Image: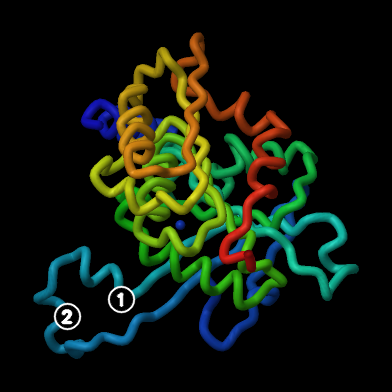
Amino acid sequence: MRTFVLVCLALATTGVGCTPGRSMSAERKSTNGGQSEQVFRKRIPNVVGLKYLRYLPKGFRDQKNRKLEYLLYLPKGYDEQTEQKWPLLMFLHGGAEWGNNINRVKKNALPKLIEQGQDFPFIIISPQCPGGYWWTEKIDALTSLLDEVQSKYAVDPEQVYLTGVSMGGFGTWALACRHPERFAAIAPICGGGDWDLAYRLKTVPVWAFHGARDPVVALQESTEMVDSLKRAGGDVQLTVYPEAEHDSWTVTYNNPKLYEWFLSHRTHSEE
């Protein structure tokens, strides 16, 4: 984990809602790759009063104003089939894409594939983590973003999925452990987390991925989470690429079976 943090900091230095009273469409700016740039912003009421806010810890103060820039992808046929409910997939990027330039998010993984013209049968949201933060520190903001998107778009609440790479892999584990009831399935890639919390995902199907030669995030990070979840009786599998280093996401997101696996799972279906 320490190595992961140091490398992500190095990458970041070389290489972030909708305003109340305005619709999401009013914030939309079209792009060539089928993705639109959005801004989510939610003001949380200050229960202690502005007079005392400056005395609170910085992390608490930041939670008062939840803001995330993100990319929105709507699948083909979305506008024409207004009565249809669509699966929602949230993607969390790695440490090299954080900051305040949303175009950086398009350089890797799912947003990159969309920019290249690939179609997906999901509504896909790809938020950008503000510089200097980790996804694990933005769980409340991500949850609020999910709430907003589900309220504004034709999302099937039983088909909400989560995936992420590297720092986003850690974020995927953390967000799902905090709110397991929200996700039908998750796919963390070269990530890790608090293995003693993995039991919370025993009702959520998990497919994890990692490169055996990863020099940034050790394979052990994934195996500890997977092994802990197995002990809890969870539905979990781990795919290890024997020759892969840190980039274990390119081959993963190019595999159609991943999306078929996502769509095979639903939450709270009547049984």
Inspect the image, locate mark 2, and give the three-letter code of the amino acid beneath it: Leu
Task: Please say whether residue 130 is visible from this viewpoint.
Answer: no
Between 191 and 180, which is closer to the camera in this rendering? 180
Marks 1 and 2 in Cβ contact (< 8 Å): yes
Query: Which residue corresponds to mark 2?
Result: 53
CA–CA distance between discs 1 and 2?
A: 10 Å
Single out the residue that lies furthest toward the front: 271
- Where residue 135 sits: x, y (%)? 37, 50
Locate residue 18, reporting x and y percent.
55, 75
Q: Is residue 178 above or below residue 189?
A: below
Identify the residue at horizontal 52%, vertical 58% (top origin): 183
Residue 2 location (% of width, % of height): 21, 30
Q: Residue at x 45, y 16 (%)?
A: 245
Is 186 rendered above or below residue 26?
above
In the image: residue 106, left or right of residue 46: right
Q: Residue furthest right?
A: 80
The amino acid beneath tag 1 is: Lys
Q: Identify the residue at image location x=41%, y=13%.
A: 213
Q: What kind of element bears circle 2?
A: helix
Q: Who comes first in sequence, dot 1 or dot 2?
A: 2
The furthest residue to the top:
243
Query: Would you identify the image quadrant in which residue 227 lies?
Result: top left
Q: Is residue 56 above or below residue 174?
A: below
- Crowd rating for badge 1 (residues with CA inside 10 Å; few <14, some 14–19, many 20+): some
